[in-house]
Amino acid sequence: MKTLRKIIEIDEDLCDGCGQCVTSCAEGALQIVDGKAKVIAEVFCDGLGACIGECPRNALKIIEREADPFDEEAVEEHMKGSKPAAHVAPSHGGCPGSRMQTFSSPCCDSMKPAAGTGGPSALTHWPVQISLVSPAAPFLKGAHLLVAADCTAFAYPDFHGSLLKGKVLMVGCPKLDDGQAYLNKFVDIFKNAGVNKVTVAEMEVPCCSKLPMIIKKAMEISGATIPMEEVVIGIQGDIKKRIVH
C-alpha cells in the first residue's frame, strides 16, 4: 500500500546521464536508463537524498508524494543479487568518467603483450578514484582492495603486473584530497562490503604516510579486522619495503 512519504524526483530535462547519483546511492535505487537517471523501484529509495549532492546539474530533489514504502529487506536482497556484468558500456549522453563499470580483465596467461608495450591492463572496474567509488559498488564485495596513492602508478613500472593484478583498485592523494571524506568512505566500505584483504601502496614521501593511517583508523571505527599490507614505493620506482599488519 502506498503511503505519503519523501522520495527522490529526477528532472529528466536537466539530467545528462553522468551517473554520479548512481554511485552515491547505497541502496541501488538508481540506474541510468536510456541516458537518464531513473528510480528503478520506489521500495529501494529511502528518500534521504544522499544522491542529491553528487548531481552536477541539480536534476535531483526530494519531494513528498504517494509512494511504495521503503523496504530495507528488499534493498538487502537487491544488493545481494547485484552482480557485475562482464562489461557495462557507458550510456548515451553525459560524461562517462564517473559511471560505474565492471569488466573482465585481459590480464591473463592467454593474453600476450603487444610489441612495444608493458603488457595488458589488470584493471577490472571503473571509476577508481576514492572520491567517486560508491561504498555499495558490487565490485567491492569480498574484494582484495588495493588502495594506492596516485603517484605509485607512475613511479612503479610493474604496477599492473605485480601490484594490481587480482585486486580492486581505489586511488587518491592523501595530501591534496579530503582525508575525513576518505575516512568516512572506508568506514562504510569496511562495514558493508566484506573486504577480505587490503594492500596500501604509498610513496616513500612523508605526506603519503597518511594513507595507511586512514585505512587503519577506518578499520578501527568500523570494527573490521582485515589483513593489511603496506607497500612503500621509492621515488625512483623501486619497492623500499613491505609491512604486514
Image: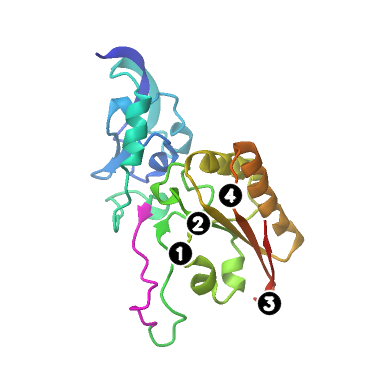
CA gap, disc 3 and disc 1: 25 Å
Q: Helix, strand, or loop for circle 1?
A: loop
Give the amino acid type for the residue marked by disc 2 in the picture. Answer: His
Magenta-tinted stretch: 101-113
Q: Dot 1 corresponds to which residue? A: 166
Q: Which residue is mark 4?
A: 226
Measure how far apart labels 1 and 2 are at the Cα level.
Answer: 7 Å
User: Magenta stretch: residue 227 in it?
Assistant: no
Confirm or deny contact between disc 1 and disc 2 (CB under 8 A).
Answer: yes
Residue hosting label 2:
144
Q: Amino acid at mark 1?
A: Gly
The CA span between labels 3 and 4 is 30 Å
Cα–Cα span, label 3 and label 2: 26 Å
In-image side of 187 versus 110 (left or right):
right
For label 4, count other residues whose C-alpha is less than 10 Å away and answer few (under 14), some (14-19) or many (20+): some
- Asked if the stretch drawn in magenta spans residue 112, the answer is yes
